[in-house]
Image: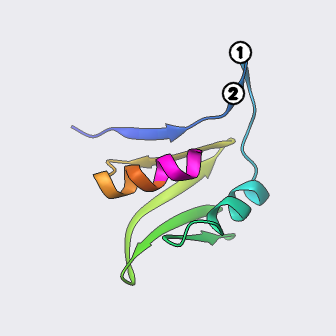
Amino acid sequence: MGYHVTILRTEGRKRRPISGEELAAAAGTIPELRYDAAGPSVVDIREGETRARLILSDGELWTKNPDEGTLAVMIRLAE
């Protein structure tokens, strides 16, 4: 059974979409992340190997079946 985890920004009860520009800027502050403007998505990199792909879709950032390391990076990114 699979699952996905989403970073969704809200203000009150209103959804505030995450933009590609915001994501690129935030990814630049976390060494494990590389922004891919072609996606747009962010790739979580560890020791030169791709571990997980974080996908920006409709203003939400998500991934499928993240491991603990990926969740830790997502929490840092969400902050």
Q: Name the residue under label 2.
A: 10
Q: How crowded is mark 1: few (under 14 residues within 10 Å), some or many (20 or more)?
A: few
Q: What element carries label 2?
A: strand
Return the x and y of residue 15 as percentages of the image width and height: 72, 26
Q: Is mark 1 on a helix, strand or loop?
A: loop
**CB contact under 8 Å: marks 1 and 2:** yes
Residue type indicated by callout 1: Arg
Q: Quadrant of residue 47?
A: bottom left
Q: Is residue 40 above or below residue 61?
A: below
Return the x and y of residue 68 as percentages of the image width and height: 29, 51
Q: Is residue 29 above or below residue 71?
A: below
Q: What stretch is highlighted in magenta?
A: 74-79
Q: Is residue 53 above or below residue 47?
A: above
Residue type indicated by callout 2: Thr
**Which quarter of the rendered picture does the C terminus lie within?**
top right
Q: Looking at this rendering, what residue extends furthest in the top direction?
A: 13
Which residue lies at the image location 48% right of the left edge and 70% below the top edge?
A: 32
The residues tagged by marks 1 and 2 sit, at their Cα atoms, a distance apart of: 6 Å
Is residue 76 a member of the stretch shown in magenta? yes
Which residue lies at the image location 74% right of the left edge and 57% below the top edge?
A: 20
Q: Can residue 3 be seen in this view?
A: yes
Tell me: 65 left or right of 41. left
Q: Is residue 67 visible?
A: no
Is residue 14 a member of the stretch shown in magenta? no
Q: Main secondary structure of the magenta part?
A: helix
Q: Nearer the viewer, residue 10 or 39?
A: 10
Return the x and y of residue 75 as percentages of the image width and height: 48, 46
| Numbered badge on residue 13 | 1
